[in-house]
Image (spheres, rainbow, N blue to C red):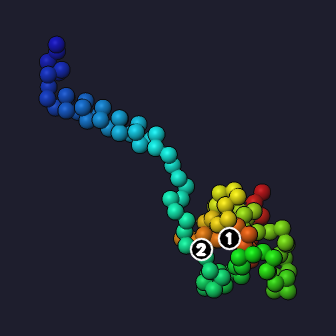
Amino acid sequence: MSQHENDPSRRHFLKMAAGTAAAAAVVGALPRHAHAAGLPHLSPIDPAAQALGYVENTAQVSQAKYPNHKPSQDCSNCNFYQGAAGAPWGPCQLFPGKDVNAKGWCSAHATRK
């Protein structure tokens, strides 16, 4: 045995390194969830929602007020929508901390390409 193998500080370091590597492997194997629980739903009467003309159903958009709206536009096909495909509600970059209806719409809609 060399003199370094008996060094208590080196043994301690090697034990700590092995323990850290094992913990990292266990944590890395745990399943990941994009959102642990759904966020509160955005209300159409929320000031931010009103500012962007948000509605929970794209069919309810006033064509007179928003002439550029197309019936095929909804939150689920918007570039700002972050919800999972097929989910009824999901987060939107424009309304932090709130979920929007996937069938909703707002005047900032930007069709995902």
Helix, strand or loop at mark 2: loop
List the residue tagged with mark 2: 41
Compared to 111, does 107 lie above or below?
below
| Total residue callouts | 2
Compared to 65, does 41 lie above or below?
above
The answer for how far apart the CA atoms under marks 2 and 1 are is 8 Å
Residue 25 image point, x, y percent: 41, 36
Q: Amino acid at mark 1?
A: Asn
Labelled pair 2, 1 in contact (Cβ < 8 Å): yes
Mark 2: few/some/many CA within 10 Å (<14, 14-19, 20+)? some
Q: Amino acid at mark 2?
A: His
Determine which quarter of the picture holds residue 73. Answer: bottom right
Image position of 63 (left or right of 112): right
Helix, strand or loop at mark 1: strand
Query: Can you say which quadrant of the picture contains the N terminus?
Result: top left
Query: At x 81% / y 76%, what residue is drawn?
Result: 59
Query: At x 78% / y 74%, what residue is drawn?
Result: 58
Query: At x 46% / y 44%, what residue is drawn?
Result: 30
Image position of 22 (left or right of 32): left
Compared to 47, does 103 lie above or below?
above
Determine which quarter of the picture holds residue 42. Answer: bottom right
List the residue tagged with mark 1: 101
Query: At x 71% / y 82%, what residue is drawn?
Result: 53
Label 2 or label 1, whichever comes before in sequence order: 2
Residue pushed farthest top?
1
Query: Can you say which quadrant of the picture contains the C terminus?
Result: bottom right
Visible residue check, residue 26: yes
Mark 1: few/some/many CA within 10 Å (<14, 14-19, 20+)? many
Labelled disc at residue 112: none
Q: Nearer the viewer, residue 93 or 88?
A: 88
